[in-house]
Amino acid sequence: MFVDKAKIYVKGGDGGDGLVAFRREKYVPEGGPAGGDGGRGGDVIFRVDEGLRTLMDFRYQRHFKADRGVKGRNKSQHGANAEHMIVRIPPGTVLIDDDTKEVIADMTRHGQQVVVARGGRGGRGNIRFATAANPAPELAENGEEGQERYIVMELKVMADVGLVGFPSVGKSTLLSVVSAAQPKIGAYHFTTITPNLGVVDVGDGRSFVMADLPGLIEGASEGVGLGHEFLRHVERTRIIIHVVDMSGSEGRDPFEDWVKINDELRQYNAGLMDRPQIVAANKMDMPESEANLAAFREQVSELRPDLEIMPISSLTRQGVQELLYRATDLLDSIPVAPVVEEVAETKERKVYKLEAEEDNSFTITRDNDAFVVSSPRIERMLKRMQLSTHDAILKLARTLRHMGVDAELRKRGAVEGTIVRIADFEFEFVENSSYY
């Protein structure tokens, strides 16, 4: 089964917690703090593996979570950083943030990798908080939470040559004739519903990858039929072989077929019209094909006199080898790099962002007899601080005083013993200023 779109959840590992510890060594009186920092959580990294061709693996495993860092240790020892999680993906995968719809990366080269979810920093141990005023702090931090997000993965097949055309014009038959691929072939429309890849050996030591792409119909650029499920794959091909049924066996006019397919390509992505194109006039073994080909050449010459038209028959293999030689020559004349809109490695764009100033704003609301304080800074602090020690409570109290929270609580009518709630943390308001 071919899967070309998937939605997954990724989460970087949480940082390890810092430790509160003191030296307890013989002959070292009043040894001081010795709690180490926690290790950093692991990143989730996507890496391109050219051996993969579909997103099938992501149909069954949709959650990827890196390991958390190791907790800090005594004797000032740093906790170990967690190993990064490496997730292999096929070339041609576009990664999109599901919330912002921002393109995170366009993965095209073997070995290319990108960090999609960073691990959290480790918490600081009490050795980091020692000062002249407080040489033995009982204060440490919890590890920072790892980044988490939902990612939409879209795979655009990467092939040198893409076969396009209406359903049942012989694309699958042509691929089966020129390569070892075994696409489904049948006398009905949309036999091919997923792209098929085949390696074509031209016979003179050269080869290329050919993709048989699902058939197009009018309105595909607006999602009709297989619509965008097909068109996204055309963008990756270096040249296009437009297969046209010259026999008119489906009751359609070959020239109108050619015009309609090109219109759909243009509406989906105007840049596709600049892609080199060869028309493979197929089914030339049928009686009406010669007359239809002559009329087709005449009509096309008025719009694109430079367009190459090569008569073939996938059934009898007439003209097939000549088509392969011409496609290979054309591939040799254009850049080997895949046709994608990306910045060269040597000229990668760098985005510099100013660090936002710390937000000291807060709001106070009333919940029955309690006051509820909402502040991004204080809530982040509560997540990081280990509030099980007296020093940690004092640090929180000082922060509230410096931000003006306690003064505002007094204005709102808070008195000794009033309940104050911040996130999940609840305490009694104390008027004793020496406590701060």
Image: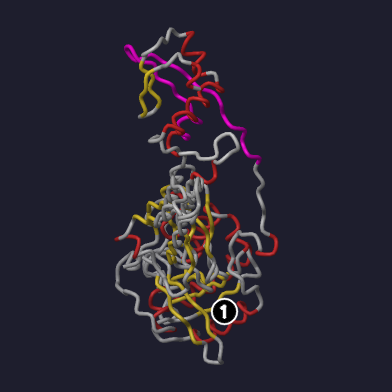
Which of the 4 image quarters holds residue 349? bottom right
Residue 373: in magenta span:
yes
Give the residue drawn at x 40%, y 54%. 68
Q: Looking at this view, is 165 or 204 the one in front?
A: 204
Q: Residues within 10 Å of mark 1 (few under 14, many from 20)?
A: many
Give the residue drawn at x 32%, y 12%. 368
Asked whether residue 262 appears in the rendered view, the answer is: yes
Give the residue drawn at x 51%, y 40%. 136
Most extreme residue toward the right is: 347
- In the rendered image, residue 435, in percent from the top left (x then y), is placed at 47, 21
**Coloring scheme of the render?**
secondary structure
- In the rendered image, residue 41, in percent from the top left (x then y), is placed at 45, 54
Give the residue drawn at x 54%, y 41%. 129
Residue on which the image places disc 1? 327
- In the rendered image, residue 237, in percent from the top left (x then y), is placed at 53, 68
Q: Looking at this view, is 88 or 73 the one in front?
A: 73
> What type is the residue that disc 1 sits on?
Ala
Most extreme residue toward the front is: 27
Judge from the rendering whether residue 16 lies leftward or rightward of residue 349; answer left or right: left
Residue 235: in magenta span:
no
- In the rendered image, residue 378, in percent from the top left (x then y), is placed at 48, 29
Q: Quadrant of the N terminus?
A: bottom left
Q: Looking at this view, is 322 or 74 the one in front?
A: 74
Count how many numbered circles sit on residues in the image: 1
Which of the 4 image quarters holds residue 204? bottom right
Q: Looking at this view, is 286 or 230 the one in front?
A: 230
Q: Give, as a single range, the part of the protein colored magenta.
A: 354-381
Most extreme residue toward the bottom is: 204
Local secondary structure at mark 1: helix
Judge from the rendering whether residue 226 lies leftward or rightward of residue 350; answer left or right: left
Asked whether residue 233 appears in the rendered view, the answer is: no
